[in-house]
Amino acid sequence: MALISLDQVAQLGTLTYYLGGWEPPWGIEYRIDRTSALVLVVVTGIASAVIPIGPGEKSYQIPGHRHAMYYAAFLLCLCGLLGMTVTADAFNVFVFLEISSLSTYTLIGLGSNRRALTAAFNYLIMGTVGGTFYLIGVGLLYQMTGSLNMADIATRLSEMQSTRTVVVAFAFVTMGLAVKLAVFPVHQWLPNAYAYSPSAVSAFLAGTGTKVVYYLLARILMTVFGAAFVFDILGFDRLLMPISLVAMFAGSVAAIYQTDLKRLLAYSSIAQVGYLTLALSLGTTEGIAAGLLHMFNHALMKGGLFLVVACIVCRTGSSQISELGGLARRMPMTFAALIVGGFGLIGVPSTVGFISKWYLVSAALGSGSYVVAALILASSLLAVVYVWKIVEACVFGKAPEGAPQEEAPLGMLIPTWALLGATLVFGLSADFTTHAATSAAEQLSNGVKTAKLISRERRQLHAHTLAEPNAVTPAQESGQ
Amino acid sequence: MSGYLGLWHYWATIALSMLGLYTLIAKNNLVKKMMGLSIFQVSVIMLYVSMAKVTGGTAPILRTDIENPVYSNPLPHVLMLTAIVVGVATTAVGLSLIVRIREEYGTSEDDEIRAIDREAM
């Protein structure tokens, strides 16, 4: 379905649907453009790989009577994520955000370890505060513009960009989404939530949850507020870029010291979110394209890797790295999948990781930040270290006594290889993904161009009005 | 009323939300944390509802007996209905998680849970 819509959007342009027949800006508008169609493909792709795995294996330790709950929560979460992607209404986003978050909390709480419960609770606290921040931001935007439709807000905002309310609204919205995206300083919920939830859930969350929020953040920064406001006036890139760089390194270094495979992957996710926000902070069309591309590729890699963990846990009952010994001989297919995914994280050529790093580095070079490009490459070296740590344990480690010799069941291997095989396919022939990401980024930054034009006109206008006494002074603005 | 005092409803909102956030961060008991979260969410409701009020406005029900009636903006109220539902759902999920945590750990104090986890490591 999502593939069809991507194709349709590519050919016909943006699809829209007015909920209840009310036209925007009064009614809620559902809108699929190139960017959201790409995200839809990611989300539905990961979901259809994860659903067949299901909770059926006894190693998930979800008791039989909870399976129905698992599927219900899973589908609700999927519904929320898809809704967030297609809606063009700022408040509707909040509703879908909460739908997906609430079902995520229950999914994490299904984990076999009792720490899953505390992880879910902490995520609930963080996630709800984030969601409420977003709500406050939307409220302030509504107060200023009188509209909830994103495109409508964008056109009205350009007249009042630098009032303090809009700046505060921007801060609230960005902060709220940053919490959900696990941007570096507010990422504390993520490692535990990924590590203690059932492996299939980790795969789903890693592949979709943060990706959809990233899309939202890009959309709100680029289309609603406009890149000119975010980057030229506020200088948000000067904040976002160091944070992303720190996240890349801190996440990777933390990943090196983990003893649990799932926690290692979770910290690696934080580092990868750093790449995503870094791409966004470049603020150029190439940067956004690289970010969207990396979002697509990372969803495949991380989803696939967590499914590998699911295969391992299914047979060995543990995801501790120390118990991975001899995995290369015991479960060759699973191990091969692990290698493919790990190479993707490093960015070895012929995997998708290489493609996205290539675009990221060239986008960084394109905007003249040579240091950033060098740091991206340096942080890839850290990825080598933590991937090597897993490989070393699997190949040279001693198998624990009485370790099961069986390969993972076919029903789990097929989805795993479907995702990781896709990383190879898109790594070798990247035309489809790069084309989709580039055209999506162009569409997103169409807003950028117009916003930049408007801001230039405004500046000229401002220069004229400065001489007149009735021009708005900052003091009057702050008094409003 | 004018100036900063005229914006008293914003001050009330800020006070409520800070109260909620403080409770959320400072309290040790999980149930109290949850209540702090609820207060924080409720403060947003106040923000929305107060901005919907139009001076001299009446309830947004169609009136024919008054010439040119001024109505308050009904949309934020509708939005807040949804937000209330979300808040209730969040509280329900959170409290049921606390129940499960208490079943597993035998306590609902944050520091005790951490201590138990540390021992198990």
Image (cartoon, coloured by chain):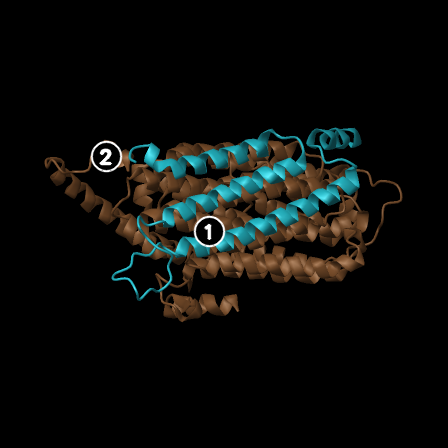
Chain colours: A brown, B cyan
Residue at the location (74% across, 59% down)?
A67
Residue matched to label 2: A476
Above or below for A239 versus A36: above
Residue A295 visible in the snapshot: no
Distance CA(mark 1)–CA(mark 2): 36 Å
Whether A296 is drawn above or below A115: the answer is below
* Residue type, mark 2 in image: Gln
Type of the residue with mark 1: Tyr
Depth order, front residue of A300/A122: A122
Q: Residue placed farthest to the front in the image?
A: B65
B65 or A451, which lies in front?
Answer: B65
The chain letter under disc 2 is A
Few, some or many residues within 10 Å of mark 1 (<14, 14–19, 20+): many
Q: Is residue A16 left or right of residue A40?
A: left
Between circles 1 and 2, the one closer to the viewer is 2
At 84% from the left and 50% from the top, the residue drawn is A405
Residue A313 is labelled as none
Q: Which residue position is annotated with label 1? A: A215
Task: Identify the image quadrant of residue A361.
Answer: top left
